[in-house]
Structure formats: C-alpha cells, structure tokens
Amino acid sequence: MFCPKCKSILRPMKDGNKKFMGCSCGYKENSGGSFKEEIKKENKIEVVREDVETLPLVDAQCPECRHEKAYFWSIQTRASDEPETRFFRCEKCRHTWKEYT
C-alpha cells in the first residue's frame, strides 16, 4: 500500500490503542477498519555439532597411540626461503604433531 500524497510505502502506526496505516508525510489511512498484526511462528534452527574433518587422510603413524592414519595440512611457519611445516592429526586419538622438512 502506498501513500496517495507522496507515493511512499504506508507503514503500520499506533496512536494510543488505535492502529492505522500512515506515512511520514502525515497521511493517515481512514479505512474505518483496523488491521491485524500477524506474527509468524518461525521454525527453530537446530545446530548439530559434529567434528567433520575436511583435511586429507594420509598414512602416518601417531607417536601417541601408533594408529596408522592421520589428517594432514601444511603451513609456511618459517622464512619464505625455507620449506613449509607439515602438521598431522591422528584420526583415532586426535593428537597433533608437526614435522619439519
């Protein structure tokens, strides 16, 4: 619904207990009736907490539990002329260790 004076969108307004559609230019809609405020009930969003690993799984022996599979990633932790540092996380016990190359 638009204001016939200034063509802006009419918004719900309140004057005491009376509710009406009005505009910032001062126009008030005189429809004689009242409008209902609809409150929509929204569905709740369920949060599922899972540790989903997106890292590649490689053959590497864990120094803690001796499991043979670990997740792998690498980061440049030293100067740019030195090789990157490889990190591993055990698939079984979640122990993390690093390997310098």
Image (spheres, helix red, strand yellow):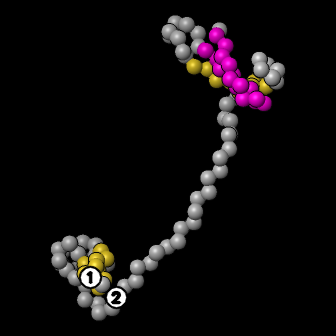
Residue 38, compared with residue 61, is above or below; it is below
* Quadrant housing the N terminus: bottom left
The correct choice, above or below, for 95 with respect to 85 in the image is below
Residue pointed to by mark 2? 34
Residue 92 makes an appearance in the image:
yes
Magenta highlight range: 85-100
Q: 56 or 34, which lies in front?
A: 34
Q: In the picture provided, is 81 more to the left or to the right than 90?
A: left
- Which residue position is annotated with label 1? 16
The 10 Å Cα crowd at callout 2, few under 14, some 14 to 19, many 20 or more, is few
Amino acid, disc 1: Gly
* Magenta residues, dominant SS class: strand
- Percent of width and height locating residue 63: 77, 17
Amino acid residing under circle 2: Ser
Q: Residue at x 49, y 73 (%)?
A: 40
- As displayed, is residue 64 above or below residue 47? above
| Residue 84 position within the rendered picture, expressed as x and y whole percent measured from the top left | 59, 13
User: Which percent across, then down, holds residue 56?
Assistant: 70, 29
**Horizontally, is 84 left or right of 99 in the view?**
left
Query: Which residue is depicted at the point 23% across and 75% down?
Result: 23
Q: Is residue 100 left or right of residue 41?
A: right
Identify the secondary structure beneath mark 2.
loop
Q: How far across and down, in percent of the image, does residue 78 sit?
A: 53, 11
Distance from Cα at disc 2 to Cα at disc 1: 14 Å
Residue 7 seen from this side: no
Pair 2/1: label in front? 1
Q: Is residue 17 magenta?
A: no
Give yes or no for contact between labels 2 and 1 (Cβ–Cβ under 8 Å).
no
Label 1 SS = loop
